[in-house]
Image (cartoon, rainbow, N blue to C red):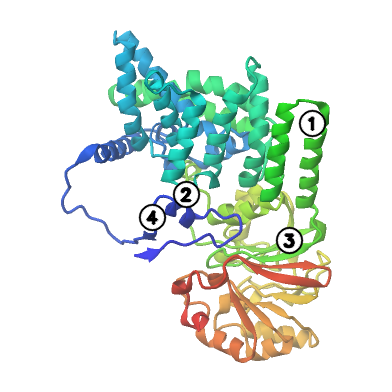
Amino acid sequence: MQPLYPATNDQQFDSRFYNQQRRIYNEVRAKQVAVVQRGSVHGIDQLCHQMRYQLERYFKRMPQPLAGYCQQLIIGDSSGSNSELDAAVRRLGIIHLFCISGMHIILITNLVQVVGAYLGIEKELLDRMLIVFLPMYLIIGGGSTSLVRAVIMAEVALCQKILKMDGLDGWAISLIVGLLWNPYLLFNLGGQLSYLLSLSLPLLEKGISPLKQCWWLSLLSLPAILYHVFEFHLLSLVASYVMIPLFGTLIFPLVVISAVSFLLTPVIANIGNSLLLVFQRLLTFFSDLPGEIHYGKPSLWWAVILFIVTLCLIENSSKRWYVILGSLYFACFMLIHFPLHGEVTFVDIGQGDNIIVETPFKRRVYMIDTGGKVTFQQPKWAKMYTKNDVSHRVTVNYLKSQGISKVDTIYLSHHDADHIGYLPTVIKEMDVKQVAVPAGMESQSALINKLRESDFDGQLIPVTDKSKQINPELKAVHPFAPGKAENGDSMALYGRFGGHNFMFTGDLDRKGELEVLQHYPGIKADVLKLGHHGSRTASDPQFLKGLGVRIGIISAGRFNRYKHPNDEVVAELKQDHILPLSTQQYGMIKYQYYGDHGRWITKLKGDELRWTLPNSLNN
């Protein structure tokens, strides 16, 4: 058993915070699980959990994408979804349709009432059955924030004659109960949108057209979406307007009918699966059309201001308020995309290297290595349903939060998987102009396959220290001749940012370090990214003293099997008064600079993950 990890990078999903909301504080890692004796089910809640488990097993027997739709829309389990669908619905701004919410409760309620009426059951009896069934479905459906709100509001509506409450009373009760159950209810996008939009609907002007209603709801939700997702698609308004009725009249009933018929008549379920596959391809097609705005993440204060001004616009729909709101969105966009400061960011990518360099005003953005891990070849059908890798959840997410959609150059230090493994992910998600590699690596199959996999159409540039400098901020000082792109051939880069000289050495060994000193005897570096993750094979004391290093950055994974960084290397750093900063201890490490001055910012304070650190970093 061990504590849960917090988020160690900016804009990374905080699984510890998410699980703590559900009263989960530790995790158990087991090599093998065996059922010794199956316990009996006691109580309604256990029965509901058992039903959820049985439904989950049943849905997993279905073909994809039907299985994923059933898991998401009936039991609220997103583990069966696929990355293609998730990306499409996020870009089109209709992700709320694929989470169990108020719309699904209304559809389920209407379905029960229609079937009940067809069977001749009285409406009062049906209402009583729903009053009992909906709390049970709350457990079966996963108990998400939006589902809690929707069920409570539906219960109030069903008991309206007894309780004598209207829709706003139901909304207020659902908010109070939700906050008592989870005080952090409104800290996530699902909670914010669920309660915001459900409150807005009854407050909007009565009798307005569905298109205008979609417009107002889209404007109201936009600040929250940008704060959490960082981008939106211009087609999102049209998508919501078209998809809401289509979803209620076709997609949801199709999923339910296919789920029920799979056991009895698989042919009907297979037809439904084919229709869902066509629907998904259409979503992907429209989401890939031009119109996606890479806005970036507004600060919390900006998001609040944009929301308040949107409320003023709805209250007084005039050109003046449209101009004010548009001007504020433009000003916020400019601050995100053209900041006065630059940054050098060491991403906590695990056991690997991933560094991002942003110059002031984001004139140029570079990446040094992408991180990665050893993976096995997968067939195309399996890749479609594989969750996004670490780079997508960490590096790409961070770049998008910064409003970055283009990377000028990716420098790959050498061919090891922990340095180039996530290259396809970055190229697919970002507009990459060129990739620079140490001379000799450009013809290697490992690199060519990754570039082919990502449909890279930019420049591939082999580099030695004698090559023409690609970008003004970074100069290659190694290798001196073409090689095999192994550790000893690593590309070493040198640059000056915010009054400090930086050197990034990949996995360069001690022999290569000393050769750099011989070729460039006067070279100095205040900040060194330690070679080979702090291994004993790098960081020669003579090299460190020759450069005049004051800060050593270590990029290594927690509990890595190589035991990086080496205890002796860290001890030598401290003995020479060099400050070691490790991503293991501090998470993402950033140097934010203005002109010739800057400051260091770390995601963690340094003591949150003390139990994961090697002894050398704990002392």
Q: Secondary structure at mark 2?
A: loop
Q: Which residue is mark 2?
A: 378
Labels 3 and 4 touching (C-beta < 8 A) = no
Report crowding for label 3: few under 14, some 14 to 19, many 20 or more residues within 10 A (C-alpha): many
Earlier sequence position, callout 3 versus callout 2: 3
Earlier sequence position, callout 2 versus callout 4: 4
Q: Which residue is mark 4?
A: 24
Amino acid tagged 2: Gln
> Toward the viewer: 599 or 124?
124
Count of marks overlaid on the render: 4
Seen at 43% across and 61% down, the residue is 4
Amino acid tagged 4: Ile
Q: From this viewpoint, is residue 155 visible?
A: yes
Earlier sequence position, callout 1 versus callout 2: 1
> Toward the viewer: 246 or 151?
151
Q: Quadrant of residue 265?
A: top left
